[in-house]
Image (spheres, grey):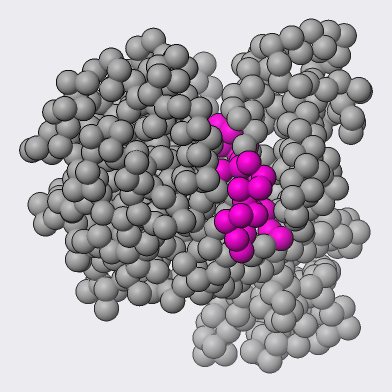
Amino acid sequence: MNMKYYIGLDIGTSAVKGALTDETTRVVATASAGFVYIEKGTGKFLEPEKFVDTCMSVIGELAGKAAEDCEKAGDRTAKPEIASVCSCCASGDPLFLDGDMKPLTPIIGWQTRVDWDILDRVYTKEEQDALYRIVGWDFFDGMPAANLAWLREKRPDILRATRFMCMSAEYLNYKLTGRWGIAHSMGTPSYLIDQEKGVYNAAMLDKFGLTEEMLPPIYNKGTVLGPVKPETAQKLGLYGNTQVVLGTFDHPSGALGAGVLEEGEMLLSCGTSWVELFPLATREAGLATGGLVDRFLLKGAPYCVMKSMSSVSDKMNERRSRLLGEISHRRFDELIEASQPGSGGLRFDFTPEDYERAKGFGQPDIARAIIESAALKLKENLVELKKFGLRADKITAIGGITNSPVCVRIISEVLGQEVGVVNGQAAGAVGSCLLGGIGTGLFASEKDAVERMRSRLKAQSSALDRARKAYEIESECIREMADFFDPDAYMHAVMLLKNAVRIGVSGCGHSGIMCQHFAHLMCCIEQPAKFILPSEAIHGGTGFLKAGDVCVLASRGGKTAELIPILDICRAKGVRIITITENMDSPLAKGADVVLKQHVNRETDKYNCQGTTSSTALAVIFHVLQTMLIEETDFKNEQFAVIHPGGAVGERLNKMENGKL
């Protein structure tokens, strides 16, 4: 049976991030690639074909990761079927095409600014004010509404030659499928769609000589646009009938990927700007805040509102670079940890003048003040939004800052409530994967997709928690073992091993595996040793041992039935016995010449049954014995080099440096 995968893209301002998920919503792989802008004056532009190539390179890389993951599954007949490709986008970057769908312009970045005198000539004050209620976004000097005004005033020839207008994500989808389409959410930043009615705004089209035929048809998000063209699928390594599914604006996709769906929840999307997103039952509730309103869930809260702390990450990075130098993220976190809450009274307001405030403060306070100041501005925003009835009972963060648990903790402390993290920097792309799954029938709705994702994350979290606990259990065991170290017993055992001509070692189960390890350790220091399989021991397997030789028996409980006969045989032959056990009153302990205490606090599994910590404890005892024997026998590295010429160790041992081994 083929394994199905879903590719999601998060097309941002500076880069495209991608995620690959399987049918369980497991994030199999991530990838990213940066965009290279052409800057002219106040304009920022992307070459259309380079933009497409960059996005397709991420798709191709993730398709390759799907093939690798499928191969790891071990089923040689299975193939990695890419069920869907879906993109979310920080859209608002138009592209104008001729009748052959060839670009007349570069992709005009949303950061491109247009002089207000041009905007005021093209739009009346009444039209500017009215756009907010129609579109859901406030009018400003960037994005397609401004770009169209500039073209009408400065390059009307381009408008006259235009036969089709789209934005970057729609152009990518067209290059993938040969078809046009746009989802309501993705179309909001175009300023051409009546958000509530879900149709193009005729007044805007008339103003610039556009018709609906010159624009992508409008669909619901999650709609299947069509299959990837065969030649493109082959080029990208997409196996199966890969469908392109229409995605959303980037922050709503991030909310889906982070599981933020309900009123009372808030997404904190920490990209170039910090954006607070709130799911809403009504559009009017969003418009009342003056924030950016967008279509949201197909089934559930139909709208969301976004409030932005514009370019705050850039401002934070500027202060970090100027006041702290070019330090690593890890060093930045260390500095924050070295400071106390409140940063010694330092606070930035992220204006050009606030650099002077840092004079007299040490680096730790400056580092902490950078993140605390942003968090305090966020807290002030939330206080204001609460006046409009927007609640943040549960906050989930995504974006780059989530790579730093320290920064997330500081934000939580400033806000006075826990800030969770789900899918972090990959949340937007994961949201696109989930939407692709909805479009192709894997999930019934956004809620279904999120519930299944949460179920998997819960299981993953449980496994990770257990993994951390396993480290704690085994580390604790090793620390506690020092309390059971008996110098006399260990020296007695070492002298027996040192003087033995032959060493036999035996144990059952996990202890037996560790005994094989010990036999090899002995051979590595030229103390001849052999593992005795318990089932063979009573069929002549102990015959190589003579009087004065040593047999090491390992049994945590000291009662292993298969080892008792070995004990009896060795006693009869005059072979000395070293027993390693937790039970000092056991038969194997009482019949030994030397007993080494094995201490085990508990096994690492939740049932306390698997031979995990007990194996580690036994291995530590064996390692200690070898370490002591190296000292007692004065074993040299030169000797080891002779018997271990193979591998990296052998190469290192035999490499001459400064005339010495």
Q: Considering depth in this image, is 137 or 245 the residue closer to the camera?
A: 137
**Residue at 74% across / 50% down in the picture?**
388
Please state if 443 lies on the left or on the right of 129 as rendered.
left
Q: Residue furthest left?
A: 100
Count numbered badges in the picture.
0
Tell me if residue 502 is in the magenta stretch.
no
| Residue 277 in the image, given as x and y percentages of width and height | 62, 49
**Residue at 81% across / 87% down in the picture?**
587
**Residue at 43% across / 46% down in the picture?**
188
Please give the range of residues in magenta: 264-292
Please state if 339 lies on the left or on the right of 304 as rendered.
right
**Residue at 28% across / 22% down in the picture?**
152
User: In the rendered image of this protein, does residue 364 appear above or below residue 143?
Assistant: above
User: In the rendered image of this protein, does residue 161 appear above or below residue 353?
Assistant: below
Q: Say which quarter of the image contains residue 468.
A: bottom right
Tell me if residue 280 is in the magenta stretch.
yes
Q: Considering depth in this image, is 567 or 219 the residue closer to the camera?
A: 219
Residue 267 in view in this figure: no
Please state if 214 lies on the left or on the right of 548 as rendered.
left
Residue 164 in view in this figure: yes
User: In the rendered image of this protein, does residue 78 appear above or below residue 534?
Assistant: above
